[in-house]
């Protein structure tokens, strides 16, 4: 695979790369660059995580060595979303279920590894650099960086202001060339590029993909079960949630179309498969798609009805989740320990 092919794999379905020229140069200089994504081990994993997992697969196909950072300390710093006594249990859950996702997508995981934040974020040099960056940044600068990710209430906790400092240092202390995240991370990634050179370290390439809208069309909500699909939801639950989903004749605030664009059709294309939308003969019979653009055009022109689209998406989501449900069967105790009933 030549440099342009590798570059196009990384670029596909991204919203922003800072910067593309630096990424191209990196691919010229290194045969196996190193990239990572940091996942704060907070709530249960939902289908929105398929977007980053597909991108992880793209990095691996482009000959990167890739690390999934299970950011346990970050999970506590973000307004204690994960209590301290649950950190290790959440890490175990994340590793198990993300491994199942990677397997479900058929990703070759030979050059993929998991790392836990607390395994290196408590080291002496790391901690000294944390203090150095804290001395170089104001509350306002740190809050602005973290605002799209960290939960700041009326009386924000100090921990939230430290969050972007740790995320910047992670790039250096894991010796990474690229950090990848959702577009909600943009301000934190820009903070890292701005601050690492102030300590004499190099700025890294930052790659961002879009966020998947919730089933209501707006941002997914942890407190609203019907805004998202949990990876372990039953087949029936998934059908009900998708039937109730907001699906306007528009690409705006349409979680169904977004999941088709960034997950289902990408996965189909990678596996040389087509999407079949089943319809009765009296409604024109089945529709077959091998690219998202044609599907979107048919939907917006109302050749494809929302209910037929939802039925097809329900079937495809269940196909993706069935192997995950099987791999997690028998691990209910792990999940219960990671997410005990409210105390």
Image (cartoon, rainbow, N blue to C red):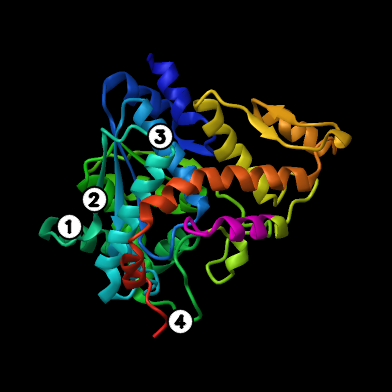
Residue at x 42% of width, y 41% of height: 104
Dot placed on the residue nearer the N-terminal end, 3 or 4: 3
Tell me if 23 is positioned left or right of 89 in this view.
right
Q: CA distance from mark 2 to mark 4?
A: 32 Å
Helix, strand or loop under label 2: strand
Q: Which residue is mark 2?
A: 115
Dot placed on the residue nearer the N-terminal end, 1 or 3: 3
Residue 335 belongs to the span the image colors magenta: no
Q: Are marks 2 and 4 in contact (CB under 8 Å)?
A: no
Q: Are marks 2 and 1 in contact (CB under 8 Å)?
A: yes
Vertical order, 227 against 105 (above or below): below
Q: Quadrant of residue 58?
A: top left
Q: For the view shown, which residue lies furthest in the left direction?
A: 124
Q: Are marks 4 and 1 in contact (CB under 8 Å)?
A: no
Dot placed on the residue nearer the N-terminal end, 3 or 2: 3
Q: CA distance from mark 3 to mark 2?
A: 21 Å
Q: CA distance from mark 4 to mark 1?
A: 30 Å
Q: Which residues are magenta?
A: 230-242
Q: For the view shown, which residue lies furthest in the right direction?
A: 282
Which disc number belongs to residue 106? 3
Which disc number belongs to residue 176? none
- x, y (%) of residue 45? 44, 58
Vertical order, 65 against 134 (above or below): above
Q: For the view shown, which residue lies furthest in the top direction?
A: 2
Q: Which residue is mark 4?
A: 155
Badge 3 crowding class, 10 Å Cα cut-off, few under 14, some 14 to 19, many 20 or more, is some
Q: Which residue is mark 1?
A: 119
């Amino acid at each position: 695979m030549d440099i342009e092919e590798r570059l196009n794999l990384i670029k596909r379905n991204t919203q922003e790369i800072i910067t593309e020229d630096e990424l191209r140069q990196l691919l010229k200089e290194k045969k196996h660059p190193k990239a990572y994504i940091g996942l704060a081990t907070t709530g249960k994993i939902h289908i929105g995580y398929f977007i980053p997992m597909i991108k992880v697969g793209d990095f691996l196909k482009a000959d990167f060595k890739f690390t999934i950072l299970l950011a346990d300390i970050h999970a506590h710093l973000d307004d204690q979303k994960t209590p301290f006594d649950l950190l290790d249990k959440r890490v175990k859950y994340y590793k198990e279920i993300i491994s199942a996702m990677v397997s479900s997508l058929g990703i070759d995981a030979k050059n993929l590894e998991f790392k836990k934040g607390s395994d290196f974020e408590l080291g002496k040099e790391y901690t000294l650099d944390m203090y150095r960056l804290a001395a170089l940044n104001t509350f306002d600068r740190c809050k602005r960086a973290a605002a799209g990710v960290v939960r700041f209430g009326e009386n924000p906790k100090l921990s939230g202001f430290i969050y972007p400092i740790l995320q910047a240092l992670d790039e250096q202390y894991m010796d990474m060339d690229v950090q990848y995240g959702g577009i909600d991370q943009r301000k934190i990634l820009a903070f890292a590029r701005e601050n690492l050179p102030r300590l004499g370290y190099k700025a890294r390439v930052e790659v961002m993909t879009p966020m998947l809208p919730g089933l209501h069309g707006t941002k997914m909500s942890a407190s609203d079960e019907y805004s998202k699909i949990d990876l372990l939801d039953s087949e029936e639950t998934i059908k009900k949630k998708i039937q109730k989903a907001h699906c306007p004749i528009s690409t705006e605030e349409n979680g169904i179309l977004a999941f088709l664009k960034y997950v289902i059709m990408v996965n189909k294309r990678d596996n040389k498969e087509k999407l079949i939308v089943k319809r009765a003969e009296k409604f024109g019979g089945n529709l077959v798609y091998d690219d998202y653009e044609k599907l979107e055009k048919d939907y917006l022109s109302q050749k494809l009805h929302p209910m037929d689209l939802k039925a097809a998406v329900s079937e495809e989501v269940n196909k993706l989740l069935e192997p995950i449900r099987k791999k997690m069967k028998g691990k209910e105790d792990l999940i219960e320990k990671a997410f005990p009933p409210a105390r």
